[in-house]
Image (spheres, rainbow, N blue to C red):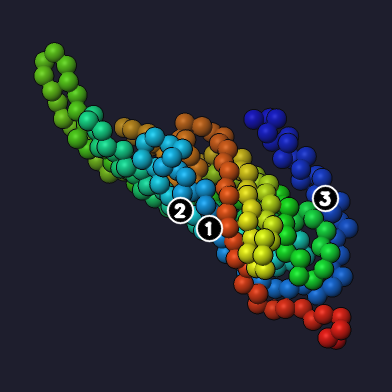
Amino acid sequence: MKVTLRFFISLCLLALPAITNAQDKFERQIFVRTGVDLSRFALPISHDFGLTGAEVSLDGEVKFHFFPILELGYNKVKNHTNLHKYDLHGNYLRFGLNYNMTNYKHRLDRNLFFVGARYAISNYSHEATEINFANNWGALQTSLPTTNLSNQWFEAVIGLRAEMIKNLYMGFTIRVKKMIFKPDYGNYMPFWIPGYGDPTKSIAFGLSYSIFYAIPIKNPKLDFEK
């Protein structure tokens, strides 16, 4: 944990000179960038308990180098076996800020190599039905009722956005997540926390790989147009 926090603190310190020296010497293009996390579609392959999900994002530059971002997603678990039927579904929201560490070369440059932070909250419910027990005295079937839960956590992130063709971007985000609030799980712990992952871990890691489309709102005037 200490090594991880020290790593991200070092990244933020490296960004400070760029923040101090950054000067907006030219008019910037104003745009909104929407994204879809492609890595969410691989969840059923990478997990063996029936996990699916989706995630979208929205960001834009409101001040030189600074990009507020909003990320919305959901997860669903459907784990049905001979021993039980377990179902979970819920949504999550992350909001925060990315700081672009690259130097802009021209007015339309929107590539990012960034560090940032997120605050996240997840609301979800789960239930377990047709839980089967068997022993020398016979068989028993029971169930656990639907329970509504909520978790909150903080994320430190680093990532890249690169323009592949005009207005179309690909990029990744590496996340280190620190749980700051979790409820009393009661009779049974959830299989998964939407947006966070393994509920048994106070620190979790994540990787997102996304495709983005930038919607121009205001284009700058070029030198020969002024």
Query: Which residue is drawn at the image coordinates 37% and 36% (left, top)?
Result: 49
Q: Of 191 and 52, which appears nearest the observer?
A: 52
The N terminus appears in which quarter of the rendering? top right
Q: CA distance from mark 3 to mark 2?
A: 34 Å
Q: Earlier in the sequence, mark 3 or mark 2?
A: 3
| On screen, residue 96 above or below 143 | below
For the residue carrying disc 3, how many other residues have a C-alpha within 10 Å: few (<14), some (14-19), or many (20+)? Answer: few
Question: Which amino acid type is marked by label 3?
Answer: Leu
Is residue 165 visible in this depiction of the protein?
yes
Query: Which residue is drawn at the image coordinates 80% and 75% (left, top)?
Result: 27
Quarter of the rendering containing residue 216:
bottom right
Secondary element type, mark 3: helix
For the residue carrying disc 1, how many other residues have a C-alpha within 10 Å: few (<14), some (14-19), or many (20+)? Answer: many
Secondary element type, mark 1: strand
Q: Of 12 and 180, which appears nearest the observer?
A: 12
Residues marked 1 and 3 touching at CB (< 8 Å): no
Residue under numbered circle 3: 16
Q: CA distance from mark 2 to mark 1?
A: 8 Å
Residues marked 2 and 1 touching at CB (< 8 Å): yes
Residue lying farthest top? Answer: 136
Which circle, 3 or 2, is nearer the viewer?
2
Quarter of the rendering containing residue 57:
bottom right
| On screen, residue 172 above or below 192 | below
Is residue 144 visible in this depiction of the protein?
no
The C terminus appears in which quarter of the rendering? bottom right
Coordinates of residue 162 in the picture (x, y in percent): 69, 57
Quarter of the rendering containing residue 6:
top right
